[in-house]
């Protein structure tokens, strides 16, 4: 609608587990659902009813998180994004990305924790962000 719709999940996603996160845009209303929790919603300011990315869309991390978010965030995304669908169509993130930072397929991603525990078998950690989504 001309600004951001702010939504905060009650669920943590920095718990070494895989999560399903759904984001939707319906007019000015944004919807966030993490796993099976109740949907959270927010309303963007302005009158526009469609998403206008005005450039690229970033999924996951960015090169300079502080600069690229206008100082809103100081910690970058750590983890992997396994599947993304836009309007119901699966996007090949690895094949269509313009650029990436620390991007690997999830089955190849080795978390910092896994590196420290050398030799022990652990699965990947999907997300280690310290803030709620």
Image (spheres, rainbow, N blue to C red):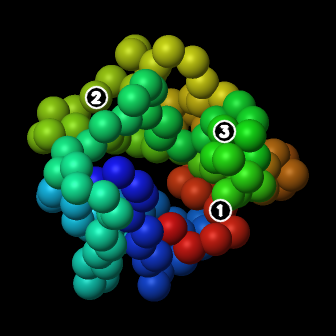
SS class, disc 1: loop
Residue at the disc numbered 1: 129
Q: Nearer the viewer, residue 30 or 93?
A: 30
Query: Would residue 49 be seen by someone viewing this image from the given angle?
Result: yes
Q: Which mark is residue 92?
A: none
* Distance between the alpha carbons at the discs numbered 3 and 1: 17 Å
> Does 73 sit left or right of 89 as displayed?
right
- Crowding at label 1, few (<14), some or many (≥20) Cα neighbours within 10 Å? some
- x, y percentage for residue 78? 66, 49
Total of numbered circles in the picture? 3
| Furthest residue toward front | 47
Q: Position of residue 46 (x, y in %)?
A: 30, 58
- Asked if marks 3 and 2 touch (Cβ < 8 Å), the reply is no
Disc 3 element: helix
Query: Dot 3, how many residues are within 10 Å of its Cα: few (below 14), some (14-19), or many (20+)?
Result: some
Q: Earlier in the sequence, mark 3 or mark 1?
A: 3
Query: Which residue is the site of mark 2?
Result: 91
Of badges 3 and 1, nearer the viewer stands 3
Quick check: 52 left or right of 95?
A: left
Q: Report whether 34 appears left or right of 25.
A: right
Residue at horizontal 42 percent and vertical 58 percent from the top: 4
The quarter in which the N terminus is drawn is bottom left
In this picture, is 59 found above or below 63?
below
Callout 2 secondary element = strand
Q: Which residue was labeled with disc 3? A: 68
């Amino acid at each position: 609608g001309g600004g951001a719709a702010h939504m905060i999940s009650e669920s943590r996603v920095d718990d070494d587990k895989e999560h399903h996160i759904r984001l939707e845009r319906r007019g000015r209303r944004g919807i966030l659902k993490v796993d099976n929790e109740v949907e959270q919603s927010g309303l963007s300011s302005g009158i526009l009813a469609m998403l206008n990315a005005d450039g690229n869309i970033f999924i996951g991390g960015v090169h300079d998180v502080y600069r690229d978010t206008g100082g809103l965030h100081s910690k970058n995304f750590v983890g992997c994004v396994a599947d993304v669908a836009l309007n119901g169509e699966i996007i090949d993130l690895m094949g269509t990305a313009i650029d990436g930072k620390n991007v690997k397929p999830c089955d190849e991603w080795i978390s910092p924790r896994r590196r420290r525990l050398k030799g022990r078998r652990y699965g990947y950690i999907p997300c280690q962000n310290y803030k709620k989504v």
